[in-house]
Image (spheres, rainbow, N blue to C red):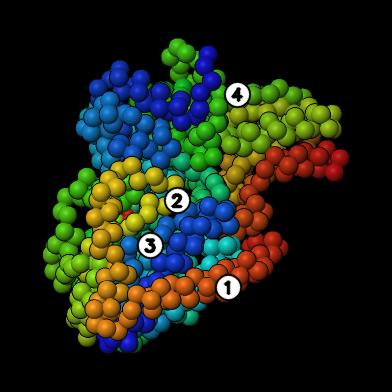
Amino acid sequence: MTLDDKKRVLREMVLHRRFEERCYQAYIERKIGGFLHLYPGQEACCNGVMEAARPGHDYVITGYRDHVHAIKCGTDPKVVMAELYGKETGCSKGRGGSMHVFDVAHRFMGGYALVGGPFPLAAGIAKGIQLKGGDEISICFLGDAANNQGVFHETLNMAKVWNLPVLFVCENNQYGIGTAIHRSTAVLDQYKRTCAYDIESAQCDGQDIDTVYEHAKTAVDFVRSGKGPYFLELMTYRYRGHSMSDSRGYRSREEEDEWKQRDPINILRDKLIAAGELSMADFTAIEKATDDYIENEVMKFAEESPEPNVADLEKYVLA
Amino acid sequence: MAEIMYWEGLRRAHDEEMTRDPLVICMGEDIGVAGGTYKATKDLYEKFGEKRVMDTPISEGGYTGLGIGASFIGIRPIIEIMSVNFAWLAMDQMFNSAAKVRYMSGGQLTAPCVFRSAGGAAHQLGAQHSARMEKVFMGVAGLRVVTPSSPKQAYGMLKSAVRSDDPVFIYEHELMYNMKGEVPDEEYFHPLEGSEITRPGTDVTLFGYNISVHWCLKAAEILEKQHGISAEVVDLYALAPLDRAGIKKSISKTHRAVIAEEDEAPVGVGSEIIAIINEECFFELDAAPVRVHSALVPQPYNHKLEKAAIPDHQDVVNAVLKMLGKA
Ligand SMILES: Cc1ncc(C[n+]2csc(CCOP(=O)(O)OP(=O)(O)O)c2C)c(N)n1
Ligand SMILES: [Mg+2]
């Protein structure tokens, strides 16, 4: 990444953080319903990988913690927020909600609510790429606990047998809802689990975007060059509860504080400040501009957009 | 009799059965340390330890099969599947192993497991978290299906299910865990077969189960107060086997039937009951039976669309008025 890239990514990460925090607020105000899973703490994962990939060109698929992944692929934050508001202008026409953000135009193939569900879908997209002969790759972002689904193993096996261009990114935040990884999972290092399928893999820090980027670059190049699937494990942490109904009784405030010392945005910010490319005042201005943008454009759009028409209830059921 | 909540009834049944029999265990995602998504296993981890209150990985097919295997040699597992939407992943084991093993082993093996799962549309949980699916379970030979509509039933059915030598699927509703109701202070076992007349009446029978019993009760009240119509409410708490005799008895009295279900209509509880009415007591009917059900759509996220997709007591009232030519 060039310095300009880094400055751009810093702004993007601030947007991703503030967008999610604003969702939290809107949920409390009951503007957003259903389940809401937020991303703060994990921003360097999605950003680092997608900087090494080609957003809008490569296919991306993920779980229910999906807002930021869509935005990074090029989805307008306005239509993501409108989706969370259940509006007709939302990227899934208000039919999907927070867990089902879709934007196929930007090759964001969606957020899915069943843990592990996207694994084989990602491999299937990779199969499609292979058949059609494109230079895209398929990228699947999922959590650590998803690897305990049988379909994880089934998919890894097929991806290897058929040499599919798919990159599995495991955002290891060490919890599946309230169950700590060591209580549910025999092998804590997730990247080791792929050896049974002879799939290339690596593990790295998920908080420092430079580290994520370097590892993702290797992974993306590997997959794009036709060498087959790759599994990248990023060690990270979600600051908030699993979803909004989670009071985080299963972990200590000390543990949370420790992780917050290695905040992905602060790490990048401080590096840019140390390089003389940014001042603290610049950063504060970025935050302020981001908040203004979210309030004046994103929220305004979501608020003012129309609801779907009830007469259209059955639209989109069948082609 | 104490008033307790639905989840407390479930919790009490777990507690009593696990205290009585060391071979009764429970397993599921976040049921131990976290106490369960709907608190049905609250504090049991502390009381019975991690060997009997098992926090499972997110491996529905795996741990359901594991529980079934344990039941082959006398363990009595109560398996919680956090949401019925995730039960799809466990159905292979429930249907192909638990439900069939007794028959295909010529009666040598049985799978006395209890599967509990929360279904139904809560609030805006979207297409992949709002399924009902009782229709899928009730058509499988070798499986019992019950759907408690009250804390008393929740408590008493779980107790009976643990003691049953058959696999039992208990369908709970996400919106009902905090519902209050009277539960006997002494031990109580609710039957796993039959039906219950929750409110007697003479003009029309409203068939419901689980949450739709409550729509029917509310509808019956409105029908009586505002329209002078006497509706009988029958709680079909057992969906497999269905109470053919109970259905026939009520129709022979009221001669009219409205079936309320939260599920979509095709291949559902309603169609099955109408078939039973046809088979058992067609000539008792004064009107064609009517189903009140959801629209055939994946559950929409938007709240207005969601409301439009799901029926409620008013739809039951309207169906009765139309049937009686009063709408
Ligand atoms: C098949 C299935 N089982 C259970 C759930 C409930 N559930 C939702 S998220 C989650 C934890 C997933 O953890 P992880 O894969 O580590 O992702 P994270 O939420 O930490 O990003 C669980 C158990 C589900 N959505 N789907
Ligand atoms: Mg996790």
Of the pair B80 and A267, the residue shown nearer to us: A267
Of the two numbered discs 2 and 1 on the same chain, state the one appearing first in sequence. Answer: 2
Q: Is residue A42 left or right of residue A163?
A: right
Can you tell which of label 1 and label 3 is closer to the viewer? 1
Q: Residue at x 17, y 54 (%)?
A: A188
Residue bearing the label numbered 3: A39
Q: Which chain is indicated by disc 4? A: B
Residue bearing the label numbered 2: A244
Crowd tier of the residue under label 3, counting other residues whose Cα lies within 10 Å: few below 14, some 14–19, many 20 or above:
many
The residues tagged by marks 4 and 1 sit, at their Cα atoms, a distance apart of 57 Å
Of the two numbered discs 1 and 3 on the same chain, state the one appearing first in sequence. Answer: 3
Please state the horizontal and vertical placement of residue B302, each as a whole percent of the image. 60, 59
Q: Is residue B122 left or right of residue B257?
A: left
Q: Hey, which residue is sitting farthest top in the picture?
A: B186
Residue bearing the label numbered 4: B196
Q: Residue at x 38, y 76 (%)?
A: A281
State yes or no: discs 2 and 1 in contact (Cβ < 8 Å).
Answer: no
Q: Which chain is indicated by disc 3? A: A
Instruction: Kindly state the secondary structure of the residue where label 3 is placed.
Output: loop
State yes or no: discs 1 and 3 in contact (Cβ < 8 Å).
Answer: no
Q: Residue at x 37, y 62 (%)?
A: A40
Residue bearing the label numbered 1: A296
Q: Is residue A168 above or below residue B160?
A: below
Which amino acid, mark 2? Met
The dot on residue A231 is none
Of the two numbered discs 3 and 2 on the same chain, state the one appearing first in sequence. Answer: 3
Q: Quadrant of residue B39?
A: top left
Q: Which chain is indicated by disc 1? A: A
Which amino acid, mark 4? Glu
Which quadrant holds the N terminus of chain A? Answer: bottom left
Of the pair B122 and A52, the residue shown nearer to us: A52
Q: Is residue A23 left or right of residue A220?
A: right
